[in-house]
Amino acid sequence: MANSSCVTEFLLLGFSSLGELQLVLFVVFLCLYLIILSGNITIISVIRLDRSLHTPMYFFLCVLSTSEIFYTIVILPKMLINLLSALRTLSFMSCATQMFFFLGFAITNCLLLGVMGYDRYAAICWPLHYPILMSWKACGQLAATCIVSGFLLSLEGTTLVFSLPFCGSNKINHYFCDISPVIRLACAETYINELVIFIFGVLVLIVPLIFICISYGFIVHTILKIPSAEGKQKAFSTCASHLIVVIVHYGCASFVYLRPSAKYTSDKDRLVTVTYTIITPLLNPVVYSLRNKDVQLAIQKMIGKTGFPLKTL
């Protein structure tokens, strides 16, 4: 440490290897970013204004949409600036701050998806006990637990990364300060740090995923007992959106984070990371709500136009 020249700032390489294609990416990502913001803000506004949507399912969706907005704000504005700028530097503290908030909101989203799976389980398998199991007090406590746990784990993970000495290259082969590309720049043994981070990854990704799978096992068992085909279809439809988001989010996140940093491959991992930093937040308002008849009706009532082309969405 005494002989090392400490890194004070990092250089985000991002998509610099693509040359003039960066301008095209800027336009594409800017459009997606605006859609993410407008879609999630619409969902939050509609749920807050329409009393018929004041249920646990939509409460958690509102919390998830809020988290998704901040999740993308942490990453996308800086990425968009870097696509147009030759100056892609980020101070040591700014990099650590970005990682802390990114991980905090990402972990919160993972935990919220697990809680939303439990909500569907309680609604379908225990309908008579549902008002007690998912009371507003219980919903508030579950949401608060997800947020607090997410940022506590994020603080620990960020500390494990930035407590390492950085005395060599400062070039991060990524478009934001993510764990694997940053920890690879450390000029010290990272095995213990990576092992602890891996254990955190298992707790955040695998444990909730197992919980969701078990919940849906009971849900399917209960749905198959429903005598009418219409009843079965209605029950399955309330779960389908959640399952789509779970598969995309957990699948991509597990591919990136449940591996040693030595297995990091910049091009492939950047593509996968784009999926859960941009596509997943984009899927939430579309898959979860804008194709939901209750939400469509609420939006139509809010804007006062019953013939609005949302019916075609």
Image (cartoon, rainbow, N blue to C red):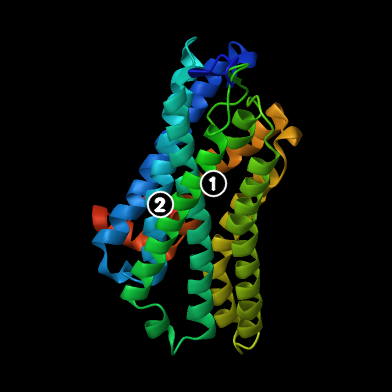
Horizontal placement of 151 versus 42: left or right? right
- According to the image, label 2 marks what residue? 65
Question: How many C-alpha atoms fall within 10 Å of the one at disc 1: few (<14), some, or many (≥20)?
Answer: many
Residue toward you, 93 or 137: 93
Quarter residue 64 falls in:
bottom left
Q: Amino acid at mark 1?
A: Thr
Q: Position of residue 74 (x, y in %)?
A: 42, 35
Reply above or below: 191 against 290: above
Asked if residue 313 can be seen in this view, the reply is no
Asked if residue 99 can be seen in this view, the reply is yes
Quarter residue 190 falls in:
top right
Q: Position of residue 183 (x, y in %)?
A: 62, 31
Precedes in sequence: disc 2 or disc 1: 2
Reply above or below: 46 against 14: below
- According to the image, label 1 marks what residue? 280
Q: Amino acid at mark 2?
A: Ser
> Which element type, helix, strand or loop, lies under badge 1?
helix
The N terminus appears in which quarter of the rendering? top right
> Which element type, helix, strand or loop, lies under badge 2?
helix
Label 2, label 1: how many angstroms apart (C-alpha)? 11 Å
Quarter residue 16 falls in:
top right
Q: Residue at x 48, y 73 (%)?
A: 119
Residue toward you, 168 or 154: 168
Horizontal placement of 20 versus 66: left or right? right
